Image: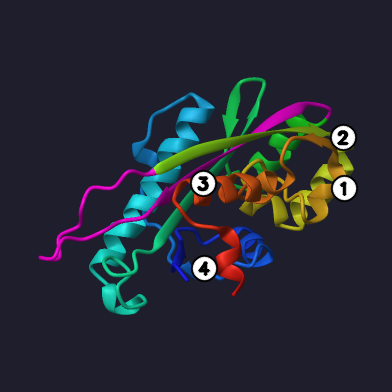
Amino acid sequence: MIPFVLASASPARKRLLHTAGIEPLVYPSDFDESLVKVTNPLGLVEILAQGKAEATMRALFSRQAELPSGFFSRNPGLILGCDSILAIQGEIHGKPRDAQEAIARWKLMRGQMGELYTGHALLRPFTTEQGSLLPYAPLVRTQVTRVYFAEVSDRQIEAYVATGEPLNCAGCFALEGRGGLFVEKLEGCHTNVIGLSLPLLRQMLSEAGVDVIDYWR
C-alpha cells in the first residue's frame, strides 16, 4: 500500500479520508498563506493547496525517519494538500477572524448562493540514489460546489456563532454540524463542502496510477 500523507490539520478532512478507507499520516503544513496575493478564487485555492503540499513535502524530506521506509525512494508516498474558500457575490471569504466577523459574514450570506472552492494538490516525490529530492509533476485540481443559504434570523446567527463551530471553518459554516441546518441545498459535490471532494480525489489517484480500493486491504 502506498503511504498517504495529509498536509492538513483539519479533522473533517481526516474523517472524510477515513470514510473512504484511507488512513492518512497527518503532517500539517507550515505554509504562510499571507504570502499569496491572488484574488481569483480558483487560482487562490490551487496555489494554496500546492503550497501546503510542497511545504509538508520539504519538511518531511528532512524527517524521513518518521515515515514508512522508502517513502521518498523505494515506495514513494503521496502527499495531499487542500485549501477551501467561499465566494459570495465575487468576494472571497476564508475562516472568520472572530465572532464579530462571523456574525457579519452570516448576515451577508443568508438568503444568498455562495460558491465553495476547494483546491487539491497531490504530490508523489522521488529521490535520486544520492538522496536528493527529484523534480515532480504535481496534480492540482479544484472542485466547486454551489451552496444555497437559508434566510436565518439574527437570533439564529448569534446562537450559531456562539457555539464556536463557524470560527474554525472556511465559509463560516460546517455542513456536517449545526451549520447544515442553515443550508437549503447544494449543487455539486457535498464532500467538497466538508473539506475535500472524494470523487475528485479518486480521479486524481487514478491519474497518479493508484486505485483507491488498494487502500482497503
What is the spatial separation of the Cα atoms under label 2 and label 1, in whole angstroms?
A: 8 Å
Q: Which of marks 3 and 1 is in front?
A: 3
Residues marked 3 and 4 touching at CB (< 8 Å): no
Q: What residue sits right under mark 4 in the picture?
A: 24
First in sequence: mark 3 or mark 4?
A: 4
Who is closer to the viewer here, 82 or 122? 122
Q: What residue sits right under mark 1 in the picture?
A: 181
Pointer 3: residues within 10 angstroms few (<14), some, or many (20+)? Answer: many
Q: Does the magenta stretch include residue 142?
A: no
Residues marked 2 and 1 touching at CB (< 8 Å): yes
Type of residue at label 3?
A: Met
What residue appears at the point 59 percent right and 50 percent down from the top-left corner?
A: 202
Q: What residue sits right under mark 2 in the picture?
A: 150
Type of residue at label 2?
A: Ala
Q: What label sits on residue 204 in the rendered view? A: 3
- Residue 196 percent location from the top left of the image: 61, 49
Residues marked 3 and 1 touching at CB (< 8 Å): no
